[in-house]
Amino acid sequence: MSHPVDRIESPCVILLEPKRERTSRSMAMEEFQVAIHQGKLSDAISVVQAKPAQYFSNTPLNVAIVGEPGSGKSSFVNSMLGKRSGEPGSAETGIQATTTKAKDYPLLMLPQVILWDLPGREESYGSRVNQVDLNRFDFFIIVGYQRFRTVHAELAHEIQAMGKRFYFVRAKTDLDLEASRRRQASGYDDQKVLQRIREDCVTCLLNENVIDPQVFLVSNWDPQSLDFPLLLQKLQSDLLWLKRQAFIFSLPSLAAPVLENKKAAMKGKIWIKVLFCGFLGLLPVPGFSFIVAMFFFVKFRSQCYQVFGLDYPSLTALARDVGKPVTALQAVMASKSLMPIILWRLPDLVGATLMMVEYCLWKRFPFAGCLVSGGSSFLTSYYMLHRCLTAVVKDTLNVLSRALEGRERTPI
């Protein structure tokens, strides 16, 4: 995907400014990843939060244009691009819905801003089959016409659940004005009609618990009229804030490769514990393999928590910094549950039962029971510890995502 190039008049700035922006952003990424490698999640987030907005000026911003089919999304994209339908590089428009898959359009007037024309979201929201994953995008413009619909409320809820923001654009407002003008031959006032439309949109959004709804009434055929210039001004003034937010929401993906490297390093410590569990499982004590395996598992999990920054002191520091209760961060940690672990150890019952049969019924040393117990303990422990390590990596990403939710919820 091509990226727009800044149009800067000063030749000195052309040479130096992009380089400085790339260096600043890469420095923020590097500092974040170093803190993740050290298991300091609180420091990792604080490093990025402390950077001024200018650090993120070269961050790509993916803006999704969403709404129901036929709402004028593609025509709106063309107006934003300054193009007419049919021109090279313009979005395809038509009477019927023409957008069947997401397509990107670099917005040359703003650096590193990409508009995405998405397929229309149907009014019936029961199935999400073939729907585009909105998590891919950083900011949203919901386009509607005629009236506020259920699909707009659903989109608003979905976007807010991701902790992201949107503008609401009432397209085809010129057609609304024309229809009102025909109905009210006398005493007609454009401004009163526009005010009524705006208040209706704002009220509907407030009813959906939208904070400080940003509503723009536009005509796709005349970008210089109504609120189109205000929309462009608003987007430009919010740009650095939105890019900063986009970078912050990308932090879990930046952390993923670092966590995978730490996971690979931790795998080497599994074999010693697995061999020890298998050896102790050979001892002729029914149920002893279960106790040993649980002890090593809990100890290994605690070690993983310390290495990845999920131990209680680290979570407490992170919760304090992001203004959330520790329980909110712990709630997304699937590895804390002991029930799956106990179920994984059910094969221990086979060895323990065979030992009891050999002791009580056959009156002999439980050779078979010991072999079964040791073998099952070895295999089950190997599976358990690998699953634990994988779960802790996922939990770290989940905790990061939960910690970042709402960090940039200041009204725009």
Image: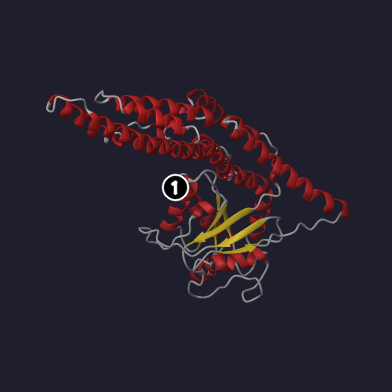
Location of the N terminus by quadrant is bottom right
Q: Secondary structure at mark 1?
A: loop
- Indicate the quadrant where residue 295 lies: top left
Q: Please state the horizontal and vertical placement of residue 69, each as a whole percent of the image.
A: 47, 67
| Mark 1, other Cα within 10 Å: few <14 / some 14–19 / many ≥20 | some
Taking 237 as reference, is 373 above or below it? above
- Residue at the limit of the structure toward the left, as seen here: 361
Q: Please state the horizontal and vertical placement of residue 298, each as a whole percent of the image.
A: 40, 26
- Indicate the quadrant where residue 7 lies: bottom right
* 115 sits to left or right of 160: right
Q: Residue at x 53, y 53 (%)?
A: 136
Q: Please state the horizontal and vertical placement of residue 383, each as a whole percent of the image.
A: 38, 39
* 274 sits to left or right of 231: left
Q: Residue at x 47, y 51 (%)?
A: 156
Residue that numbered label 1 is attached to: 208
Q: Is residue 227 visible?
A: no
* 216 sits to left or right of 278: right
Q: Is residue 392 visible?
A: yes
Q: Please state the horizontal and vertical placement of residue 252, each as a whole percent of the image.
A: 55, 42
